[in-house]
Image (cartoon, rainbow, N blue to C red):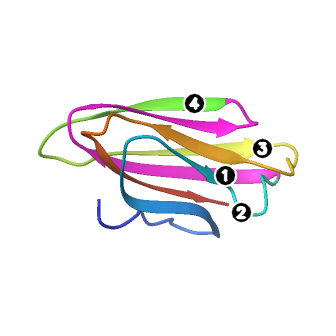
Amino acid sequence: MSRAPVLPEGEIVAQVANASGNREMEIRGGIKAGALSVLVNCQGQGKLTVSLEPVGLSFPLECVNGEVSSTFNQLDLKRDRGHGTVSVTAPSSVRWALTVGR
């Protein structure tokens, strides 16, 4: 997890690599109307959960030892929110990397 997932197109608004455990990050510039993409990679035994606020989106990713698990989620948001955060909850045994883009 030394590198964050690559956003196929658009602007990166939050990114972290080589993380473990829980973390909360600001979404630069808030949440804008339109597409918002969340890419996550993880490795290690356990379940990782990603939450986006104030949108209310939450999704899990099962992580396993010895291989990289990945997911890509995209939302089409109808309106702007002035502030936004992305939170990851994961056991300390799980290493992960995340990219959020629009």
Q: Which numbered marker is on residue 28? A: 2
Disc 1 packing (10 Å; few <14; some 14–19; many ≥20): some
> Which mark is nearer the camera, 1 or 2?
2
> Which mark is nearer the camera, 2 or 4?
2
Q: Which numbered marker is on residue 77? A: 3
Q: Are marks 1 and 3 in contact (CB under 8 Å)?
A: yes
The structure residue drawn at horizontal position 87% and vertical position 51%, both measured from the top left corner, is 82
Q: Which residue is mark 1?
A: 36
Q: Secondary structure at mark 2?
A: loop
The first of marks 3 and 4 along the sequence is 4
In the rendered image, residue 10, in percent from the top left (x then y), is placed at 63, 69
Asked whether 26 falls inside the magenta stretch, the response is no
Q: Is residue 6 above or below residue 53?
A: below
Asked whether 52 falls inside the magenta stretch, the response is yes
Q: CA distance from mark 1 to mark 3?
A: 7 Å
Q: Main structural element of the magenta stretch: helix, strand or loop?
A: strand
Give the magenta part as a residue range. Answer: 33-56
**Left or right relative to 83: residue 91:** left
Mark 1 residue type: Leu
Disc 4 packing (10 Å; few <14; some 14–19; many ≥20): few
Q: CA distance from mark 3 to mark 2?
A: 16 Å
Mark 2 residue type: Arg
User: Which residue occupies the foreground of this view, 36 or 3?
Assistant: 3
Disc 2 packing (10 Å; few <14; some 14–19; many ≥20): some
Q: Which residue is mark 4?
A: 58
Q: Is residue 84 above or below residue 49?
A: below
Q: Are marks 3 and 2 in contact (CB under 8 Å)?
A: no
The structure residue drawn at horizontal position 72% and vertical position 44%, both measured from the top left corner, is 76
In the rendered image, residue 36, in percent from the top left (x then y), is placed at 66, 52
Mark 3 residue type: Leu
The first of marks 1 and 2 along the sequence is 2
**Left or right relative to 39: residue 2:** left
